[in-house]
Image (tube, coloured by chain):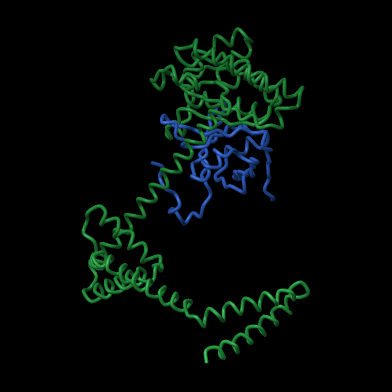
């Protein structure tokens, strides 16, 4: 029997600020591993408390197991044990590991853990069900050890040693998404900052280069507006940046200021041009000759439809012929 | 010498997410006995890398493969969170980092 005065704790986990762990597991062996991991985490996150509170209780179970001070001996795992043996042993003692002054709460949820783990061990082996399905068990390990100087509050106790099913797993996933979103935001901010730095750098360009750049950007913006076309990626980035600055009430680059001022007019010009083009097209289709040619052509095509089932090639030839005929007719008509 | 592979099927290991007091995942956690095979070798491992949905944890003693890790853990790997391997019995621990080109430190962004 060796006494460890200063129980081991994981400096890495402590350094990372880990206070809880979610352990998703699948199947009975996975669950046994999960329970082993939960026990290891318990030690790693606040072994002192566990030892102080757990030691005596375990002694009632087997004196031999209580003799050692490490968690592994506490839960009675021996090297030869199979993973399934571990399930039973760990689960049986897990509920006994008291972590905080609120021992009653812990032992209550500890019971739930025992029930769940035992179920996974016995039922699944007899029914062969659980092994195949994803059990999705989550072992929540929250530590409120005196070492940490933090007491567990009521709602946090819910996460302690309860085998929480899907709901908790979903929560963990949501939390991961939050992290993802946050990283995306950081990235976004970073990109924005880089663009602003580029913009500031442009201010320090020599005058002629600056003027040329401004002119190019202005022309690109006008062209895109006139043709409803796209800017290049670089131009679009600069356009969006200026638009954002304008929206925030900042001073935009001259090309954007000029373009914004004229944008309305450019749009009007474009609309007028479009209208004119449409009108031209309308007047074209309104042309009597054109109309008669079209209807004749359609008639020919309809007649040619009979050639369709045999071969498309025939139809193509036929319609070509038909259109040639139409051409002839139309030239005659227009005369 | 060939590298020893220890493959753990999807239902024969447990991989935890370490959460901080805001319940934000900050690392992945394994203990030497939370994998069915190769547990002793992961305490000396150095890098991990994702191959499909499988986590490969490599070190001088071999490669421990965890098949089809959970989505939440995949996300953590995607965020390049460190993997902490603990062995309370022998009072050992090791931080295993996501494998990347040692010349590049640009890929790692701090979690806010």
Which residue occupies the foreground of this view, B14 or B59? Answer: B14
What colour is chain A? Answer: green
Q: Residue at x 58, y 11 (%)?
A: A58
| Displayed quadrant of residue A76 | top right
Which residue occupies the foreground of this view, A329 or B60? Answer: A329
Q: Position of residue B50 (x, y in %)?
A: 58, 47
Q: Residue at x 59, y 9 (%)?
A: A59
Which residue occupies the foreground of this view, A72 or B30? Answer: B30
Specify the quadrant that holds the N terminus of chain A. top right
Q: Is residue A196 above or below residue A39?
A: below
Q: Position of residue B28 (x, y in %)?
A: 52, 37
Q: Residue furthest right?
A: A310
Q: Which chain is displayed in blue in the rendered image?
A: B
Q: Position of residue A195 (x, y in %)?
A: 32, 59
Q: Is residue B38 above or below residue B3?
A: above
| Displayed quadrant of residue B39 | top right
Q: Residue at x 59, y 16 (%)?
A: A112
Q: Is residue A196 left or right of residue A97?
A: left
Q: Position of residue A62 (x, y in %)?
A: 64, 10
Q: Is residue A29 above or below residue A284?
A: above
Q: Is residue B54 above or below residue A119?
A: below
């Amino acid at each position: 029997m060796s006494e460890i005065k200063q129980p081991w704790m994981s400096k890495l986990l402590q350094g990372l600020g880990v206070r809880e762990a979610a352990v998703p597991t699948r199947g009975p062996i996975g669950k046994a591993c999960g329970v082993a991991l939960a026990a290891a985490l318990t030690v790693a996150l606040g072994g002192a408390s566990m030892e102080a509170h757990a030691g005596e209780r375990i002694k009632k179970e087997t004196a031999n197991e209580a003799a050692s001070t490490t968690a592994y001996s506490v839960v009675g795992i021996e090297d030869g044990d199979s993973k399934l043996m571990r399930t039973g042993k760990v689960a049986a003692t897990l509920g006994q590991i008291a972590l905080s002054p609120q021992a009653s709460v812990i032992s209550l949820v500890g019971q739930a853990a025992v029930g769940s783990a035992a179920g996974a061990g016995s039922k699944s082996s007899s029914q062969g069900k659980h092994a195949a399905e994803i059990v999705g068990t989550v072992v929540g390990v929250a530590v409120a050890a005196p070492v940490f100087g933090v007491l567990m509050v009521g709602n946090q106790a819910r996460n302690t040693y309860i085998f929480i099913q899907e709901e908790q797993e979903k929560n963990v996933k949501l939390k991961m998404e939050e992290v993802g979103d946050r990283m995306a935001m950081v990235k976004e901010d970073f990109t924005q900052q880089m663009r602003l730095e580029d913009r500031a750098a442009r201010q320090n360009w020599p005058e002629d280069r600056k003027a040329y750049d401004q002119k190019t950007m202005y022309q690109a913006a006008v062209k895109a507006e006139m043709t409803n076309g796209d800017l290049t990626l670089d131009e679009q980035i600069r356009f969006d940046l200026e638009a954002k600055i304008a929206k925030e009430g900042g001073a935009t680059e001259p090309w954007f200021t000029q373009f914004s001022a004229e944008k309305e007019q450019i749009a009007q010009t474009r609309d007028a041009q479009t209208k004119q083009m449409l009108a031209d097209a309308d007047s074209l289709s309104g042309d009597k000759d054109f109309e008669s040619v079209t209807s004749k052509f359609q008639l020919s095509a309809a007649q040619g439809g009979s050639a369709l089932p045999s071969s498309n090639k025939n139809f193509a030839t036929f319609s070509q012929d038909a259109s040639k005929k139409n051409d002839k007719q139309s030239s005659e008509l227009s005369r | 010498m060939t590298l020893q592979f220890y493959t753990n099927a999807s239902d024969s290991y447990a991989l935890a997410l370490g959460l901080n007091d805001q319940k934000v995942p900050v690392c992945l956690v394994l203990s030497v006995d939370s994998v069915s095979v190769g547990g002793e070798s992961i305490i000396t491992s150095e890098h991990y890398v994702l191959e499909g949905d499988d986590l490969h944890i490599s070190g001088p003693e071999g490669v421990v493969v965890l098949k089809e890790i959970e989505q939440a853990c995949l996300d953590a790997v995607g965020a390049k969170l460190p993997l902490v391997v603990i062995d309370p019995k022998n009072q050992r621990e090791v931080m295993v980092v996501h494998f990347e080109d040692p010349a590049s430190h640009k890929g790692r962004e701090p979690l806010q």
